[in-house]
Amino acid sequence: MAWKKAPEWLVESFDRLVPDDDPRVERRKMFGYPCAFARGSMFMGLHEDRLVLRLPEGPREEFRERYGAAIFEPFAGRVMREYSIVPRELLDDPAELVPWIRRSVDYAASVEPRGKGGGKKGGRKKAPTKKGG
């Protein structure tokens, strides 16, 4: 299944919302969508017509309850539990959204970045092999 291109208005919103005053923040693309990283960990990004935001457990639950935000699932069966879909109403209220983005940056900057291969930094560890057998 091919993903839809992010609408221009959402790309423009993303560009305005990514903190430019934080040296930990880096912009990159992931799967062709604009994303933002702090110390190598993604904290915010676009996917199709949605903005997703990564938050730690307590604030994440508060965000979901307060705004009715859904858990991000890029495709069926692939739940990304730390990421929430930012509701459209919140996108229209940057003053309300920016503090959540700051929390997201701080959280991502505190997480050990993942290496290639999906594991912790340095990649996945290989299973031990049996000797002599």
Image: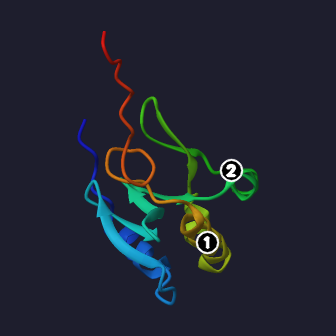
Rounded to the nearest whole Å, what is the CA distance between mark 1 and mark 2?
A: 23 Å
Q: Which residue is mark 1?
A: 106
Q: For residue 96, what is the image quadrant?
A: bottom right
Classed neighbour count for the residue bearing mark 1: other residues with Cα under 10 Å, few (<14), some (14–19), many (≥20): some
Q: Nearer the viewer, mark 1 or mark 2?
A: 1
Where residue 85 appears, as percent x and y from the top left, is 54, 53
Q: Residue at x 23, y 41 (%)?
A: 2
Q: Is residue 27 left or right of residue 100?
A: left
Q: Residue at x 40, y 78 (%)?
A: 15
Q: Residue furthest toward the top?
A: 133
Where residue 3 appears, as percent x and y from the top left, is 28, 46
* 15 and 105: which is toward the camera: 105
Q: For residue 128, what is the image quadrant?
A: top left
Q: Residue at x 66, y 56 (%)?
A: 56
Image: 133 above or below 64: above
- Residue 68's disc number: 2
Image: 33 above or below 77: below
* 9 and 103: which is toward the camera: 103
Classed neighbour count for the residue bearing mark 2: other residues with Cα under 10 Å, few (<14), some (14–19), many (≥20): some
Q: Amino acid at mark 2?
A: Gly
Q: Secondary structure at mark 2?
A: loop
Q: Residue furthest toward the front?
A: 132
Q: Amino acid at mark 1?
A: Asp
Q: For residue 27, what is the image quadrant?
A: bottom left
* 3 and 8: which is toward the camera: 3
